[in-house]
Image: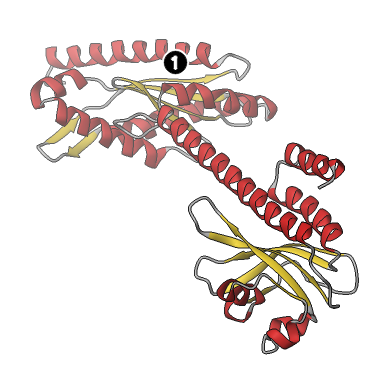
Amino acid sequence: MSDNFIERISTALGSEKTLEGFVRQLLEMLELVTGMESTYLTRIDDDRIEQHILFARNSQQMQIPEGLSVPWQDTLCKRALDEGRTYTCNVPEVWGDSQAAGALGITTYVSTPVTLADGAIFGTLCAASSESKPLTQRANQVLMLFSELIAQHIRREQLLQELSEANDALTAVSYTDELTRLPNRRAVFHRLPGLFARCSLETRSVLLAFVDLDGFKQINDRYGHETGDAFLQAIALRLQSFAAVDSVLGRLGGDEFIVACPGPLQQSDAAEALQALREQLTSLLAGRYPLAECTIDYAGASLGILAVDPHLTPDQAVRAADAAMYQDKARRKQAAREADRHPCL
């Protein structure tokens, strides 16, 4: 092989990031080396029912169309693999009963399998011509080399895909509360900036509800931590059923949750939206929770509900909602004390 040819291969290996771009460069070089009219890469489906032309280069009269699918049993590639015959310059005589070869007008045909690291055959790398053409030893060597390079490129893409999927899985785990399967604190503060930016563009406030489960320690102490965990999971399910698609919902930790969503377009409607949100969450969270070991009649949560300016940072907004929650908790405790002192009221 000439230094120029090796340099072209090295450039393709270094510059082309996609299988398509890499293969197209190899097909062009393969055409120059073999002198064939068409060079192409095929993919054999997993069930070995069809063979598909993935990428093709047609420089003369013969046209091997990309996207063409033919029955695997009728292909020259299968016959070549089965018979160990990688090349013939007289297809009509050797494989005259192949309908696909007849339809495409193939006289000279050469191919080699693209075999992956696990031994599976991905497809074939082929060259064909409507005329009878010889195949030099050099051309055959290049064909096999290109097949190996394509297999390596496919494996590299597979590894990158596997790494991407593994990274996505790790990210999902790191952003998910293990107990409730809600987004965790990290995920909440990752998503809040996007919600705030969107509300700023739309000239909306952000409705923020900081939820603290009153009496959760008593539930744990009375029924045990397993029941406490089941109660948190039940709370999470109710919040999931309530939160809209454009909401940010998550567990901040312990018995604290947060719900954030776009506020109304008109600032004058903010008070009405806040009251509606309070009533919805109060009704949602209070009530009966049938759990595996017991049934809990729950009085409800303390809520810090605010319409915040989207120009605040998410941290500032959450701290403000947290402070509002403590005010609500103090109010609820005072109301409970008043009820204890005057049970008939």
Rendered image coloring scheme: secondary structure
Instruction: In this rendered view, identify the residue nearer to me: 23 or 240.
Output: 23
Residue displayed at 11% across by 25% down: 224
Q: How many marks?
A: 1
Q: Residue furthest front?
A: 137
For the question of whether residue 133 can be seen, the reply is yes
Q: Which residue is mark 1?
A: 321
Instruction: In this rendered view, identify the residue nearer to me: 194 or 158.
Output: 158
Q: Which quadrant of the rendered structure holds the C terminus? A: top left
Going by the image, does 102 lie left or right of 311? Answer: right
Instruction: Measuring from the top left, give residue 290's x and y in whole percent.
Output: 16, 41
Q: Residues within 10 Å of mark 1 (few under 14, many from 20)?
A: many
SS category of the residue bearing label 1: helix
Residue displayed at 62% across by 71% down: 51
For the question of whether residue 276 can be seen, the reply is no
Residue displayed at 77% across by 39% down: 10
Residue 309 position (above or below residue 279): above
* The image quarter in which residue 88 lies: bottom right
Instruction: In this rendered view, identify the residue nearer to me: 300 or 168.
Output: 168
Instruction: Measuring from the top left, give residue 56's x and y in whole percent.
Output: 77, 63
Instruction: Measuring from the top left, give residue 33's x and y in whole percent.
Output: 83, 58
Instruction: In this rendered view, identify the residue nearer to me: 45 or 149.
Output: 149
Q: Amino acid at mark 1?
A: Ala
* The image quarter in which residue 170 lies: top left
Residue 199 position (above or below residue 130): above
Residue displayed at 69% across by 66% down: 111
Going by the image, does 204 lie left or right of 8? Answer: left
